[in-house]
Image (tube, grey):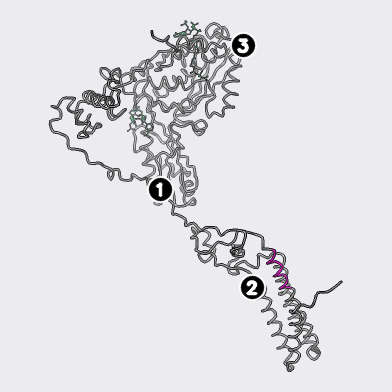
């Protein structure tokens, strides 16, 4: 086995020892201790010479982890967790050399016979020697197994951060570009001061009422009079006349002059009621046919259902469903829950503070405070629940309130502002991001409405004798049950619907909404429905519709307009009920009954495959000659 030439380092150590031996004999204790100290210092320096060290950003004290970190200008350490192999060998060589140096020092010391004669010196030697060996192997032991420990910052043990060799120009990872963090955008709404956006209004001619409609229309076209100010200057009906002239002029420039001629604007629409409640920049109204389905027996009473629709066949179909239900047990409808919701989004400087708001709201005594301020804004509304949800720094507070006979969106929105003000007294750092944080959830398909409900949560049922299923619905019980399972349950499940386990609930919800002055956009969540059908032991058909979020009112919104009010009157629910809320609840029952009648008839048509024939008859006018 050939040995390599002795290393120059080995020769150097011998030279050192030889020179030491040539020194005059000093006191062995002093000599020995200084040698051990020198070799320990040497080994410490050698062992630490390669480690990289960087002050922790902002001093690295324990608290700094909780403070938002300022990214220093120091280059971030390399992301590699593995020491480079080359560096490993170099350091190992250092250890071997140092160990050899120490052993040679010991060898030298052990030759000093005079020094070791008496037991005291021997004891001293052994103590110093064992301490130094522990210290030395401590280096070896720790560093040999976990190289990284050697590099941790000695001053902070709670959170030792690994330090890797700084990336050099030829190291594998390119240095990561330091990006300055932007402070979070201010969450105060942009239009915090609406007046700051007020545009100067043009001066209005004093004699405007003496001018002709055409002259006023041209003033509007010249932007000397604001279109949307006409109702303030003229009788609302005249304002509509003038506006039609102005709009027709504009359409004419697009080659569509006279287009509005067929749009009715006279007679029954009371524009005084519309102004400030239902529509702006009015040029007329859309007459939608209103069919009257029924009567249907609902909770023991006979009810007619007004439906505004342009879908031929829909009213006939619902009418057939009403007939079949009435020939059977009649519809039995129950209200499970009644409360409209609004979920403001507020924001705090930290998630910690957001959690404090969450926990504060959850305490019953604090909910009472919110209830008090909410109810100070309305004579009918009652705050039933405040359910917070945290997402980071945001808290979404889903407020649910009883709204009497109103659908309640204006009511609860107004009350929500009072709740926010109350929270701001307790949490000055709170800021309102949006009054509607979308967990309400208004006019959007959302599981929260399907699961938690919104507005009136209703379940309705009926039993149809098998003979009626055959004679009126033209199908059989097994066939319609089979169609329902495979279409409304399995088919909807495969489509991944949220609340859409039904055939066409939206058809009837929307038709009744339009006829009775509801907010038609709320048909999204109001049409949440699961339609279930079973064959009873007697072979009859049992049907139910469960609708957790029907949002209706019989006061407010469009319910005050003459045509819509007439339909509410036909149902028997116009205006406020004897007890606040009675009329709105009854309207919810009617919406559910219309839906169930529609489900019954359409499912029968699908089970008997007569849908297309029916629509060709009722939903397609032969092309006019
Ligand atoms: C059209 C019917 C009712 C005929 O139904 P029928 O049984 O052939 O007609 P009938 O002459 O035997 O009359 C039976 C009953 O139906 C009613 N009825 C019958 N005709 C009328 C009429 N003109 N006007 C008012 N009511 C009518 C009326 O109650 C009548 O009883 P009667 O009064 O004679 O004692 C039936 O074929 C039907 O309901 N078809 C289903 C049509 C339907 O439901 N369409 C809904 C819209 S489709 C859609 O948009 C949703 C969809 C399909 O896309 C959703 C999905 O994906 O599933
Ligand atoms: N603001 C919003 O974010 C949204 C608004 N909407 C719209 O809001 C309108 C509906 O708002 P809504 O609050 O229902 O109605 P309104 O704002 O039209 O007015 C309802 C008010 O009528 C008073 N009132 C009188 N009698 C009764 C009674 N028996 N029961 C209940 N209230 C009664 C109450 O006044 P008081 O409370 O002062 O006692 C109640 O707040 C619709 O036009 C809809 O389109 C829809 C979605 C969102």
Q: Which mark is residue 187?
A: 1
Graded by Cα atoms within 10 Å as few (under 14), some (14 to 19) or many (20 or more), the crowding at tag 1 reads some
Residues at marks 3 and 2, CA–CA distance in whole angstroms: 91 Å
Q: Is residue 87 magenta?
A: yes
Q: 393 above or below 30?
A: above
Mark 2 crowdedness (10 Å alpha carbons): few <14, some 14-19, many ≥20: few
Q: Which is more toward the observer, 425 or 321?
A: 321
Relative to 457, 495 lies left or right = right
Q: Residue at x 23, y 33 (%)?
A: 226
SS for dot 2 = loop
- Locate the N terminus by quadrant: bottom right
Can you identify the residue that label 3 sits on? 539
Residue 17 painted magenta: no
Vertically, is 395 above or below 615? below
Please report the bounds of the magenta region as a residue range: 85-95
Q: Earlier in the sequence, mark 3 or mark 1?
A: 1
- Rendered location of residue 26, percent (x, y): 72, 92
Pick the residue in front: 561 or 625.
Answer: 625
Give left or right: position of 285 versus 500.
Answer: left
Callouts 3 and 2 close, C-beta under 8 Å: no
Percent x, y for residue 497?
54, 28
């Amino acid at each position: 086995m050939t040995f390599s030439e002795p290393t120059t380092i080995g020769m150097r150590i011998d030279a050192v020892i030889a020179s030491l031996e040539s020194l005059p004999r000093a006191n062995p204790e002093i000599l020995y201790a200084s040698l051990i100290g020198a070799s320990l210092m040497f080994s410490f320096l050698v062992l630490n010479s390669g480690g990289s060290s960087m002050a922790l950003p902002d001093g690295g004290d324990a608290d700094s982890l909780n403070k938002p970190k300022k990214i220093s200008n120091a280059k971030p350490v390399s992301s590699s967790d593995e020491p480079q192999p080359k560096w490993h060998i170099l350091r190992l060589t250092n250890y071997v050399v140092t160990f050899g140096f120490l052993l040679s020092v010991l060898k030298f010391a052990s030759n000093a016979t005079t020094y070791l004669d008496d037991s005291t010196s021997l004891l001293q030697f052994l103590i110093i020697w064992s301490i130094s060996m522990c210290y030395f192997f401590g280096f070896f032991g720790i560093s040999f197994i976990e190289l990284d420990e050697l590099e941790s910052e000695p001053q902070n043990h709670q959170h030792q951060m690994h330090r890797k060799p700084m990336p050099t120009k030829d190291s594998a990872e390119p240095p990561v570009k330091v990006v300055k963090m932007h402070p979070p955008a201010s969450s105060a709404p942009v239009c915090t001061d609406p007046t700051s956006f007020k545009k100067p209004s043009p001066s209005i001619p004093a004699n405007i009422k003496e001018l002709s409609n055409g002259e006023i229309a041209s003033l509007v076209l010249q932007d000397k009079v604001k279109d949307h100010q006409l109702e303030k200057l003229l009788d609302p009906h005249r304002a509509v006349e003038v506006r039609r002239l102005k709009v027709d002029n504009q359409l004419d420039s697009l080659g569509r002059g006279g287009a509005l001629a067929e749009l009715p604007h006279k007679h029954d629409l009371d524009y005084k009621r519309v102004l400030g409640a239902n529509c702006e920049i009015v040029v007329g109204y859309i007459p939608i046919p209103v069919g009257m389905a029924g009567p249907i027996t609902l909770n023991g009473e006979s009810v007619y259902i007004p439906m505004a629709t342009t879908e031929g066949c829909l009213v006939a179909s619902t009418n057939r469903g009403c007939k079949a239900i009435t020939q059977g047990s009649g519809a039995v409808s129950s209200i499970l829950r009644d409360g409209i919701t609004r979920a403001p989004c507020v924001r705090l400087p930290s998630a910690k503070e957001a959690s404090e708001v969450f926990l504060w709201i959850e305490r019953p005594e604090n909910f009472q405070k919110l209830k008090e301020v909410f109810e100070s804004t309305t004579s009918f509304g009652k705050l039933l629940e405040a359910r917070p949800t945290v997402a980071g720094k945001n808290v979404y507070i889903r407020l649910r309130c009883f709204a009497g006979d109103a659908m309640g969106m204006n009511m609860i929105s107004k009350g929500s502002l009072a709740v926010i003000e109350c929270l701001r007294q307790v949490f000055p750092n709170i800021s309102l991001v949006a009054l509607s944080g979308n967990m309400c959830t208004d006019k959007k398909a959302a599981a929260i409405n399907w699961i938690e409900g919104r507005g009136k949560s209703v379940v309705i049922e009926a039993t149809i004798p098998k003979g009626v299923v055959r004679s009126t619905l033209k199908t059989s019980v097994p066939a319609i049950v089979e169609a329902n399972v495979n279409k409304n349950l399995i088919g909807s499940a495969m489509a991944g619907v949220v609340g859409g386990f039904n055939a066409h609930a939206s058809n009837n919800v929307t038709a009744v909404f339009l006829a009775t002055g509801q907010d038609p956009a709320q048909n999204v969540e109001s049409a949440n429905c699961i339609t279930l059908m079973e064959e009873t032991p007697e072979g009859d058909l049992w049907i139910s519709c469960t609708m957790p979020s029907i949002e209706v009112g019989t006061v407010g919104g469009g319910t005050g307009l003459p045509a819509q009010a007439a339909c509410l009157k036909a149902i028997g629910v116009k205006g406020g009920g004897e007890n606040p809320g009675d009329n709105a609840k009854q309207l919810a029952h009617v919406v559910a009954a219309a839906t169930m009648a529609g489900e019954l008839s359409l499912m029968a048509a699908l089970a008997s495959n007569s849908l297309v024939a029916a629509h060709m008859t009722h939903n397609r006018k032969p092309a006019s000659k």
